[in-house]
Image (cartoon, rainbow, N blue to C red):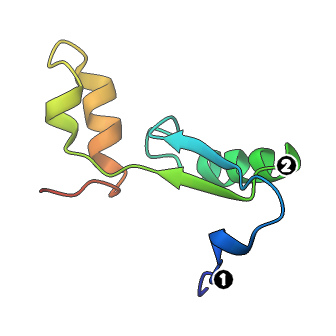
Amino acid sequence: MKPERIRFDALQSTFVVAEIGVNHEGDVRLAEKMIRQAAAAGADAVKFQTYTAEHYISIVQPERLARVRRSGWTMEI
């Protein structure tokens, strides 16, 4: 799907971007649900984040770290 080009300088109202971030924790179905919920709430777009799990999740949470690593939604910078 190719995103629609938007001329922000020509908008007549506020453009709302919902922040989903990493709240889906790698669960694609949950991410899709959150997108639908954001749209239902009036958001015009959603924003996700990419990150390196080891930088943000404590090693004392091995189950969470493993789950987020499996997501495939990370990117080394």
Name the residue located 44 percent from the left edge and 46 percent from the top edge: 26
Badge 2 density bin: few <14, some 14–19, many ≥20, Cα 10 Å: few
The quadrant of the picture occupied by the C terminus is bottom left
* Camera-side residue of 71 and 8: 8
Identify the residue position indicated by label 2 in the image: 42
Q: Secondary structure at mark 2?
A: loop
Residue 6 vs 38, above or below: the answer is below
- Indicate left or right for 29 with 71 as reference: right
* Camera-side residue of 18 and 26: 18
The quadrant of the picture occupied by the N terminus is bottom right
Residue 28 vs 63, above or below: the answer is below
* Labels 2 and 1: the sequence-earlier one: 1
Query: In the displayed image of the protein, which residue is found farthest to the bottom?
Result: 2
Query: Residue 69 appears at what percent x and percent y?
Result: 26, 44
Identify the residue position indicated by label 1 in the image: 4
- Indicate left or right for 24 with 57 as reference: right
In the rendered image, which quarter is residue 6 located in?
A: bottom right
Query: Residue 60 appears at what percent x and percent y?
Result: 18, 12
Query: In the displayed image of the protein, which residue is found farthest to the front?
Result: 9
- Indicate left or right for 75 with 16 as reference: left
Q: Secondary structure at mark 1?
A: loop
Name the residue located 65 percent from the left edge and 78 percent from the top edge: 7
Query: Residue 16 appears at what percent x and percent y?
Result: 71, 50
Residue 53 vs 47, above or below: the answer is above
Q: Amino acid at mark 1?
A: Glu
* Camera-side residue of 50 and 44: 44
Badge 1 density bin: few <14, some 14–19, many ≥20, Cα 10 Å: few
Name the residue located 66 percent from the left edge and 83 percent from the top edge: 4
